[in-house]
Amino acid sequence: MTAHALQRDSILPALRLVAGRKPSVDDIYPRLFDAILEQRIAPSSRFTEEGLGETFGVSRSVIRRVLAKLSHQQVIILRPNQRAQVAAPNAQQTRQILEARRMTEITVVQLACAQATSAQIHQLRELIARERDCIERDQRGPAIRLSGEFHLQLAAMAGNAPLAQFLNSLVPLTSLIIAQYEAKACTYCAWQEHAAIVEAVERRDSTTAVNLMMQHLDHLESKLVKHHCT
């Protein structure tokens, strides 16, 4: 399936929010990522800069920057003289990704407990509310993306740029795996687990926050690896 096979009506209404100016990379990125997560661009499909530019009404240079970001996050694969391709991680890669996330997010949640502000806690709760709303509305792609953004925002709160950058190369790829192997967004109700983590962070209860994060990632791995094996 190419970018021309994208359903325009499912993408362009969201872009009306930025009417009067050309959509930016920040406008296009979540919409293209949602299209990938909802498999309007199927796993292992290839698509062109020209086709995506036409779909979103932007130049190839903007699309190129969006694809570069998704490539850095390992969501798509870019090779010289070839079309971009959506990644399709296997069971072994999934285990390795989640193992790396465990090791990183232990430190992230400990740092967040030590220095999170009330304003940052409020931002996390707003993000969880948006995630829950998308799940209830059966907006699968945005729900999965926002679930990943919870972890990235938590990492930003930790105040360690290298850790945040490392997670930014793992979390979006995890979101892609969830989209490819979870049948429905409502079966992955991470918002409840996220809410419990935030409560522990707000109390500065590092031990509980770490345990909840590890349980959260263990739960995720058990479901994703099972899907790979069926």
Image: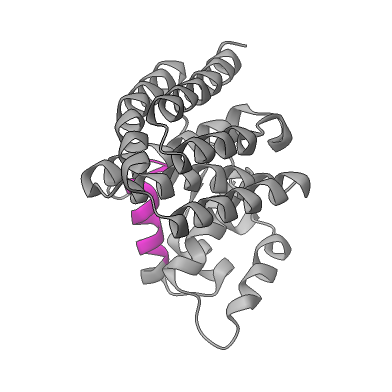
Q: Residue at the right extreme?
A: 137
x then y, percent, for residue 158 = 31, 46
* Left or right: 50 in relation to 71: right
Q: Is residue 58 above or below residue 154?
A: below
Quarter of the figure with residue 205: top left
Applied colour scheme: one colour
- Foreground of the two, 43 or 229: 229
Tell me what residue is drawn at x 49 percent, y 45 percent: 150
> What secondary structure characterizes most of the magenta part?
helix
The quadrant of the image that shows the C terminus is top right
Tell me what residue is drawn at x 50 percent, y 81 percent: 22
x then y, percent, for residue 130 = 64, 54
Q: Is residue 52 above or below residue 184?
A: below
x then y, percent, for residue 114 = 32, 42
Q: Residue at the front extreme?
A: 203
- Is 74 contained in the magenta span? yes
Tell me what residue is drawn at x 64 percent, y 56 percent: 6
- Foreground of the two, 75 or 188: 188
Residue range in magenta is 63-76
Q: Is residue 195 above or below residue 52?
A: above
Q: Residue at the left extreme?
A: 162
* Left or right: 52 in relation to 186: left
Quarter of the figure with residue 31: bottom right
Tell me what residue is drawn at x 45 percent, y 56 percent: 118
x then y, percent, for residue 140 = 68, 44
Res 82 seen here: no
